[in-house]
Amino acid sequence: MKSTGFEEIEHPSDIRIKFNGKTMEELFENAGLGMFSMITDLSRVKAVKKIKISLSIESSSPEDLLVIWLEKLLYYFEVEDMILSRFNIKKITFDNNGARLSAEISGEKTGDNKHNIINMIKAPTYHLLSIRENKKKHLWEGKIIFDV
């Protein structure tokens, strides 16, 4: 795995990435970073606008929370015209009542044709979605496919 915390995996029609993190929070940050790295060259994106996010779901599944997280990030891209480049998960909790996530994301507006869109990601999918703890490596590892 690259030092970025994610890498693209070959897939015949969509985009698939694997990502990791020392904590569940870092795992989710790297999933967001990986997704936006598939959309555009993030080295050209300035983190000038900060947005706070709070998510709460009834499911206590990390996979469900990940999909909702990535869908929320895509909302900012598609509806708010934001290219996101920084993902700071403050806290993720799971209990019998579900899961919660609080984060601060940063990026900039897509205007002025500054950002070349490489891939238009429509949605994260549940197909072959996995999150697991690799106790030997002391890492959380995930894989996801994006519909393009």
Image (spheres, rainbow, N blue to C red):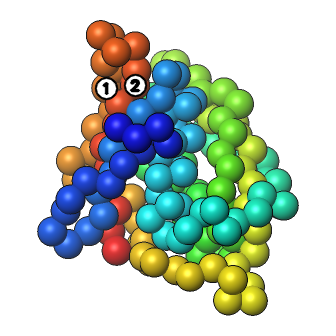
Residue 84 rendering spot, x and y as whole percentages:
66, 61
Residue 8 rendering spot, x and y as whole percentages:
32, 54
Report the residue at 74% width, 85% height from top: 111
In the orientation shown, which residue stands out farthest toward the bottom?
Answer: 112
Secondary element at tag 1: strand
For residue 10, which quarter of the picture?
A: bottom left
Determine the CA span between mark 1 and mark 2: 6 Å
Report the residue at 50% width, 61% height from top: 37
Residue 19 rendering spot, x and y as whole percentages:
39, 40
Return the residue at label 2: 140
Q: Amino acid at mark 2?
A: Trp
Is 134 or 52 nearer to us in this picture?
A: 134
In the rendered structure, the answer to whether residue 13 lies left or right of residue 65 reads: left
Q: Specify which label sits upstream in the sequence, 1 or 2.
A: 1
Badge 2 local density, few (<14 within 10 Å), some, or many (20+)?
A: many
Return the residue at label 1: 132
Report the residue at 34% width, 20% height from top: 133
